[in-house]
Amino acid sequence: MNYLEFGNGYRDFSPRVNNNYVAPSIHVNPELDDLFEESRNWSDHFGKLVMRHLFSAPFDAPVEIAILNEYIDWTLDEVPSLYRAARDATLADPDNIDYLSELNFHLVAPRVENQWHMLLDQAYTAPDQRTDESQSWIATIAADIARARKSQMALEEKSGIRNGIVGAYNGQLTELDAHIAALEVSRQNPNRGLIFLPAPKRFESFRSVKNADLLMLDRLAQQARGIQVKTRLSDNDLSKAVFERYNPDFITFIDGFTDLGNCIDQEIGGGRHRSVSWPGLVSMDHLMRTPIHKMPGAAGQNVNKAQSRGLRMTQLRTKQIAAELSRGRKNFIPIAVQNISGRLLQDLQKEPTYEFYKRDRPTSQH
């Protein structure tokens, strides 16, 4: 779909009026709302920036890059505490889960700085090294979440009580995996002007039939597409209902189980086994492939000896987590790219049919 048609599909957005920041259940936590105000303002800013790019509106690239750097500094200072607050609130009350999911944008956005530069500067192309660095940062975040998920699953198995946070972790891990695979698609298609961004809230409204987790832009062909990521979609009526809830003119699905290969074999007794969803394996694959000297923070850091030792310990711990959670298995990234690349590039070029809007509408009687 061309830029203008895609952008027009997301013009109608007013988070303060339409309450787009919460799920249809409209669960509101005033305390968290206060904490999230600045993060939502940043999401609004980047949503507007994408829209300006789609409509070829002028902007001052050096100014916007300076704002991007300010945002990255803000995420380093504020997002960890916001994440802990949302996590603790969700553990206390599962109805707060959407606040945790809302932070997905801020987990990735500062780590794909080169993708924003491509949005701002038509002449800029992200070097492979910068793309690899983005993937490594995303995978490192995934390792921490995967470890937290494993601990929570053990607690829930012991207590027999589930509060839903494992599902939120699964969703976050699947999105992080999808972004790593998508960046690899971009790397393998250097002649395309592909940009992959986490979707700001304008594009990820819970109530929208065009709800996207990632945005795929081709700045050379001026084409755009939204990507919706699901941990697992199986062939049943529920999955069919999920598909039918989204507008296929705007949205392409990535299934963590079938597309990304995020599954493990689990024994269920009596010599029987089943494949179960296990998000995070794409990220762990990347970490397993990445030498220590190329891990985030390994190079280009102005740090003292104590900080250097701390970074080294973090890198080693992350590698250990990756080895443990992936059980030494590799090759998830090549398989994921093979599964999604052709579909993403094909869907990017699709012309809209507008059939979604005609669905279930009564025909005129004569």
Image (cartoon, helix red, strand yellow):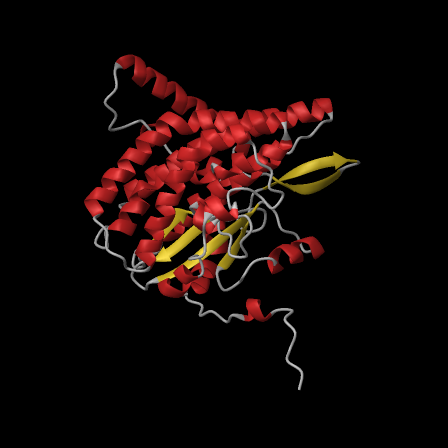
Q: In this view, does 152 lie above or below 112?
A: above
Q: Which of 132 and 149 is in front in this view?
A: 149
Q: Which of 129 and 291 is in front in this view?
A: 129
Percent x, y of residue 348: 42, 62
Let me know if residue 245 appears in the view: yes
Quadrant where the N terminus is found in the figure:
bottom left
Q: Is residue 366 above or below residue 46?
A: below
Percent x, y of residue 354: 51, 70
Residue at 68% across, 37% down? 266
Percent x, y of residue 59: 23, 51
Let me know if residue 287 appears in the view: no
Q: Is residue 10 above or below residue 26?
A: below
Percent x, y of residue 235: 67, 56
226 to the left or right of 164:
left
Quadrant where the C terminus is found in the figure:
bottom right
Residue at 21% across, 48% down? 60
Residue at 56% across, 68% down? 357
Q: Is residue 103 above or below residue 225?
A: above
